[in-house]
Image (cartoon, rainbow, N blue to C red):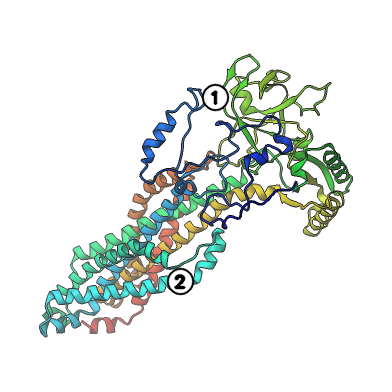
C-alpha cells in the first residue's frame, strides 16, 4: 500500500505517553481491506484515544462532571470520563494504555522511605554532634572565658552545620551526575540532569537545609550551655535525661530500620510468590513469531502461504506443535479485544458484563497447555461446523453455571452472531497475578498476529535453541522473503510483567541498607560516648576481676533492650504499611511469622556487632590507665 506524505511532525518527546513515528488519517484507514465494511467512528469503541483541547481557565472538575452526566450515546447506563494528560503516567492504570505507566503509590512509597532516611541522618547528626561536643568542652570553656557570648557559640555551631550540609550537597550532586547513566540503565529511562532539574530541586534543597539547621540547633544549645569552669577542668558529665534522650533517638532509628527490614522481606516474598505461583499454562520452550506479513492477512494468497509456513514448521524435527493466535498469556492487553453485550444460554441479555476475547487456532490450547474443565477445543468453522467458542470457568460462573459441563454445547450471542460453546477451559492468568482473572472467550478465525512454535527437548540447551531459531528464521525468510520477523519467548515475556516489581524490590533493599548503615553509625557513636562516660567503672570492674565477656554483657544489655522496644513498636507499623502495599496485587502472599523473627534477629545482630566493636575496645584498655585519668 502506498501512502502520500503530507507533512512532517517534530519528534515526539520522551515524556509523552504515546510514542509515534507517523500518523494515518481515518479517511485513509476506511479504504483498507478489513475496514471497508461500513466502519464508522463511535463513542463506545475502545480502539482509539480521544483528546480534548480546553481553555486554560477551564475548571477540570466541572468539565468532568458535565461529561459524566452527558448522555452521549442515548444510553443512560453509559458514562464517559476524562483525565489530564499529565495524570496519565502516574495516576492511570487502565487497560489498553499506550504504554506501561508508572505508579504514584510507588513513587510516594519510595519518597517516604527517602524522607525517613533523611530524618534518620538528622537524628544521627544530633546524636553524634552532642557526643562530639564533650571533646570540645575545653574549647568552649576557653571561648567563654575570652568573652564569647552564648549566641556567638550557637551561631558558630549552626554555621558548621550549614558548611557540612553544603559539602554533603556538593558530593550528592557529583554522585547524581556520575551515577545517572547507571540509574537510567536500571530503570530503562533517559533522564538528564540539567539546569531545569536544579530549579525543580530548590524546594527540596531548602527543606533539607532547614532540617539540617534544626538538627544542628540542639547540639548548639548543649555546647553553648557548658559551664566554663567545669569545661576547663574536663568535668562535664551528661545528665541522665540527656542520656535517655540519646537512647530515645537510637530507639527511633532502629524502629524505622526494623520497619524497612520487614518491608524488604515482604517485598521479596511477594515477588517470589508471583514468580512461583502456577499460572494455568506452560510457556517454556514456546516462542511467538511475529512479522509484518502475518499482521496483514487479508487475501487468500497470503493465507495459503501462511498455511504452508505452518506445515513446514511442523515438519521440523525439533518442533512439537504449531498454532496461530491473536495474543498469548503475558502479552497484556495487546491484541486483546474487550466488549459488552452478550445473550446468555437462558435468553437473558447482560449489557454491563465486560469480557475479553481473542482468536486462536484449534490446537492453540495444546501449544500453551491450557487444560479443559469440560468439553473440547473448537473446530475450524465451516458450513458443517457452526461457529464455536471456548470460554473460561470465570465466564461460566458469571453466566450462573457452577458445573462447566452444564454449559457445553449451549449457545450465546454477541456481535449479532450466535456461537456454540464447545468447551470450558480452566482459568489461567492471562495478565499475570497482579490482576484478577477476567471473563474470557477464545474463538477460531483466520486473522492472527502470532505463530506460536513449541520446541521439544532437543532445544533445551543454549546451543540447541539457537540452532532451532536459526532454522525457523531461515524457513520464514524462504516463505516470506520481503517480510521482517521478530520472535519472543513466552515465558520471558510473562516474567517481564514483574520487571517493575523487581526494580522496586532492589530499590527497597538499597534504602534499607542505607537505613541500617545510618542506624549502626548512630549506635556506634552512642556506644563510644557510653564507654567514655563509664571508663572508670570499667576500670574498677577489671581490677576486681571482671572478664571481657562480663563487660561486654554489661555494655550490650542496655542497647539490646532499646532494640527490643523498637521491634515491639515496629511490628504493627510494618505489618500495616506492607498490608496496604500488598493491596495492589490481586494475588498476594501472607505474613509469615519468620518475617518478623528474621527482622528482629537482623536488628539484634547489627546492634551486637556495632556495640561489641566499641565494647571490646573499651574492655581491653589497661584499667590502670583508665583510673589514672581520674
Residue 431 screen position, x and y as percent: 61, 40
Residue 421 screen position, x and y as percent: 72, 23
Residue at image point 40% right, 53% down: 259
Residue 409 placement: quadrant:
top right
Residue at image point 67% right, 41% down: 28
> Is residue 275 in view from this perspective?
yes
Residue 315 placement: quadrant:
top right
Instruction: Say how many tags the image has.
Output: 2
Q: Is residue 220 above or below residue 392?
A: below
> How far is mark 1 from mark 2, CA to CA?
54 Å
Mark before the other along the chain sequence, 1 or 2: 2
- Determine which residue is flagged by label 1: 352
For label 1, the crowd category at 10 Å Cα-Cα, with few meaning under 14, some 14 to 19 and many 20 or more, is few
> Is residue 537 in view from this perspective?
no
Left or right: where does residue 232 sit relative to residue 284? left
Residue at image point 37% right, 69% down: 521
Residue 282 placement: quadrant:
top right
Left or right: where does residue 434 sit relative to residue 596? right
Q: Which is more toward the observer, 184 or 507?
A: 184
Asked if the residue under mark 2 is in contact with the one under mark 1, i.e. CB atoms within 8 Å, the reply is no
Left or right: where does residue 390 sit relative to residue 320? left
- Determine which residue is flagged by label 2: 175
Residue 135 screen position, x and y as percent: 24, 79
Amino acid at each position: 500500500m502506498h501512502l502520500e506524505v503530507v507533512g512532517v511532525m517534530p519528534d515526539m518527546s520522551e515524556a509523552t505517553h504515546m510514542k509515534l513515528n507517523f500518523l494515518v488519517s481515518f479517511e485513509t484507514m476506511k479504504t483498507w481491506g478489513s475496514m471497508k465494511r461500513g466502519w464508522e467512528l463511535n463513542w463506545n469503541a475502545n480502539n482509539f484515544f480521544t483528546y480534548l483541547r480546553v481553555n486554560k481557565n477551564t475548571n477540570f472538575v466541572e468539565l468532568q462532571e458535565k461529561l459524566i452526566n452527558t448522555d452521549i450515546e442515548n444510553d443512560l447506563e453509559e458514562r464517559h470520563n476524562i483525565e489530564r494528560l499529565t495524570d496519565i503516567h502516574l495516576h492511570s492504570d487502565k487497560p489498553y494504555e499506550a504504554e506501561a505507566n508508572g505508579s504514584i503509590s510507588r513513587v510516594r512509597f519510595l519518597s517516604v522511605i527517602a524522607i525517613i532516611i533523611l530524618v534518620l541522618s538528622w537524628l544521627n547528626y544530633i546524636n553524634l554532634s552532642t557526643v562530639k561536643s564533650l571533646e570540645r568542652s575545653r574549647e568552649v570553656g576557653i571561648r567563654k572565658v575570652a568573652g564569647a557570648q552564648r549566641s556567638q557559640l550557637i551561631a558558630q555551631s549552626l554555621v558548621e552545620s550549614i558548611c557540612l550540609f553544603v559539602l554533603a550537597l556538593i558530593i550528592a550532586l557529583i554522585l547524581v551526575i556520575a551515577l545517572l547513566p547507571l540509574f537510567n540503565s536500571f530503570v530503562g529511562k533517559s533522564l538528564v540532569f540539567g539546569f531545569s532539574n536544579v530549579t525543580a530541586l530548590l524546594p527540596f534543597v531548602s527543606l533539607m537545609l532547614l532540617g539540617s539547621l534544626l538538627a544542628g540547633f540542639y547540639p548548639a544549645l548543649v555546647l553553648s550551655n557548658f559551664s566554663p569552669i567545669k569545661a576547663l577542668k574536663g568535668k562535664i558529665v551528661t545528665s541522665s535525661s540527656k542520656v535517655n534522650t540519646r537512647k530515645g533517638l537510637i530507639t527511633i532509628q532502629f524502629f524505622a530500620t526494623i520497619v524497612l527490614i520487614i518491608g524488604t522481606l515482604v517485598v521479596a516474598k511477594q515477588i517470589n510468590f508471583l514468580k512461583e505461583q502456577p499460572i494455568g499454562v506452560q510457556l517454556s520452550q514456546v516462542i511467538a513469531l511475529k512479522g509484518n506479513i502475518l499482521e496483514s492477512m487479508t487475501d487468500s494468497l497470503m493465507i495459503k502461504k501462511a498455511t504452508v509456513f505452518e506445515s513446514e514448521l511442523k515438519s521440523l524435527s525439533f518442533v512439537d506443535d504449531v498454532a496461530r493466535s491473536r495474543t498469548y498469556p503475558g502479552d497484556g492487553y495487546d491484541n486483546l479485544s474487550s466488549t459488552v453485550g452478550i445473550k446468555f444460554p437462558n435468553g437473558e441479555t447482560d449489557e454491563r458484563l465486560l469480557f475479553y476475547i481473542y482468536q486462536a487456532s484449534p490446537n492453540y490450547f495444546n501449544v500453551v497447555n491450557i487444560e479443559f474443565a469440560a468439553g473440547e477445543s473448537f473446530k475450524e468453522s465451516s458450513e458443517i461446523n457452526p461457529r464455536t467458542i471456548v470460554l473460561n470457568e470465570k465466564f461460566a460462573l458469571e453466566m450462573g453455571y457452577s458445573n462447566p459441563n452444564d454449559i457445553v454445547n449451549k449457545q450465546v450471542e454477541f456481535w449479532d452472531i450466535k456461537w456454540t460453546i464447545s468447551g470450558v477451559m480452566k482459568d489461567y492468568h492471562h495478565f499475570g497475578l497482579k490482576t484478577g482473572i477476567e471473563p474470557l472467550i477464545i474463538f477460531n478465525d483466520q486473522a492472527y498476529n502470532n505463530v506460536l512454535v513449541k520446541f521439544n527437548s532437543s532445544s533445551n540447551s543454549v546451543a540447541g535453541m539457537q540452532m532451532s531459531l536459526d532454522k525457523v528464521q531461515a524457513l520464514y525468510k524462504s516463505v516470506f522473503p520481503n517480510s521482517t520477523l521478530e520472535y519472543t519467548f513466552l515465558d520471558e515475556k510473562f516474567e517481564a510483567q514483574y520487571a517493575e516489581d523487581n526494580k522496586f524490590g532492589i530499590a527497597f533493599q538499597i534504602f534499607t541498607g542505607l537505613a541500617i548503615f545510618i542506624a549502626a553509625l548512630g549506635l556506634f557513636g552512642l556506644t563510644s560516648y557510653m564507654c567514655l562516660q563509664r571508663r572508670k567503672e570499667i576500670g574498677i570492674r577489671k581490677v576486681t576481676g571482671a572478664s571481657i565477656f562480663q563487660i561486654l554483657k554489661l555494655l550490650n544489655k542496655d542497647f539490646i533492650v532499646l532494640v527490643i522496644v523498637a521491634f515491639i513498636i515496629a511490628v504493627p507499623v510494618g505489618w500495616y504499611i506492607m498490608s496496604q502495599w500488598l493491596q495492589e496485587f490481586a494475588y498476594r502472599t501472607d505474613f509469615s511469622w519468620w518475617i518478623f523473627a528474621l527482622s528482629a534477629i537482623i536488628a539484634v545482630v547489627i546492634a551486637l556487632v556495632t556495640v561489641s566493636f566499641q565494647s571490646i575496645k573499651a574492655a581491653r584498655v589497661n584499667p590502670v590507665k583508665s583510673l589514672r585519668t581520674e
